[in-house]
Image (cartoon, rainbow, N blue to C red):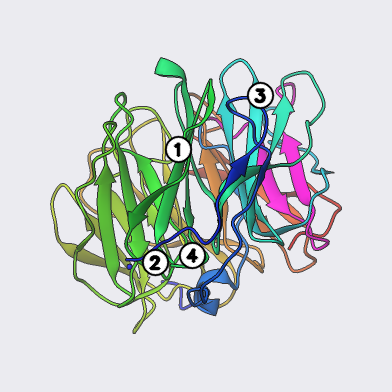
Amino acid sequence: MFTCFTRWRASAAILMLGVAGSLIGIMPASATAAAPPLPSDVTALSTPFVDPRGSNYVVTRATTNALLFGRRNPTIPVRGVTALADAGGSLQGDPQAATIPDVGIRVFARDTSNQVVTNLFPNGGVQTGFTVVPGLLVSSEIKVVQLSGADGELVRIFARGLDDGAVHTNLLTASGWNGWRNLGGFTTSEISAALTTGSGNTFRVVVRDGDNRVSTTVLSSDGSTTGWTGIGGPAVRGNIALTGGNRPGVQPNEIFLQDAATRAVMTYNFDQPGWRSLGGVANSDIAVLNLFDGSVEIFVRGTTNQLYVNRRAPGAANFIGYVNLRGILTGNPGAGAALTGDPAAYVYVRGDTQRLFNRLQRSHFDFEDYIAVSGIPTA
């Protein structure tokens, strides 16, 4: 075992420039006192974002606050992303991304002016550069949920409003942005969200609320929500991991988090409500993977700063217990699973030299050695 919530009001009119779908706009000026920022237990550690549909790219932030972007080289499958390139920008927090079918990879982030910015890396082309998603100043990272492109819906994003601390969402379609919508609530963590079905674009959203406990809502494709509901349980430390990970057919029915009092890893299943402790003492946020064979794995940094994994086999009720994957981590682990075949998954961590490393997982719970993937220091 390793030891290791509503108010929102526009404070200035929003002016959108150009054709429908333009990403250029004048941001609203804040006329009210901002909501308290996210606490340090949420923001202290960075997390590399790994492509949830095949581990084909990784995005993270450099110590210079620039975006670092890398694609996996398909000719070297066992290496994952072999290098990260400086894509510029002035960011805070961790970027996330989504694949736009037949177009490329679109990255989203919060810049140092608290704007939501995006950058497109086309297939076979060069990046377009950063543009602003107008209409909202934010105080969180941008949660990105990749969509299939059906009915022209490409990506839904979620962010914490700077003024109110509430959860806001925006939908990118083939025609452009639909505009920000306030879902209410008050979040003291980054936002977790995932599709609840393989079609229809209904989302489960999970946050840590003002009482430091879990609150959730479901956003339906018609725009209605179930309202925010607390599910009880322990006070939470850090952020909440939600299964699903934009993977087709995987339901966001289970969360993993740190108990604030004991720092043990706790899990809750929405389909079979009830809390369960997986033990241990966590020293980071938790990365959760749904592998193609139906197994579930969680990755966490222990109090020795080494990486640990725990696995629940397909059809099993229990996790096997923590396995030490060693290394020295200076951030949260990030992970992505392959859709089929072998390799099964890639895990990315920041080491004690601020370089990013990955570790390939073969099928049958077999891990290769750590390999450095960037000479650029990561935040």
Please state which of residues 153 and 67 is positioned toward the viewer in this rendering: 153
Q: Quadrant of residue 61?
A: bottom right
What is the CA distance from the residue labelled 3 to the residue labelled 2? 31 Å
Q: Nearer the viewer, mark 1 or mark 2?
A: 2
Q: What amino acid does circle 2 point to?
A: Thr
Q: Earlier in the sequence, mark 3 or mark 2?
A: 3
Bin the neighbour count of mark 1 within 10 Å (Cα to Cα): few under 14, some 14-19, many 20 and up. few
Q: Earlier in the sequence, mark 1 or mark 3?
A: 3
Q: Nearer the viewer, mark 1 or mark 3?
A: 3
Where does the image place residue 121, in percent across and percent down from the top left?
A: 73, 30
Q: Residue at x 36, y 65 (%)?
A: 7
Give the label on residue 364, or none. Answer: 1
What is the CA distance from the residue labelled 1 to the residue labelled 4? 25 Å
Q: What amino acid does circle 1 point to?
A: His
Q: Quadrant of residue 153?
A: top left
Examine the structure image and report whether residue 66 is included in the region drawn in magenta: yes
Side of 161 where 355 appears, left or right: right
Q: Which residues are magenta?
A: 54-76
Label 3: which residue? Answer: 104
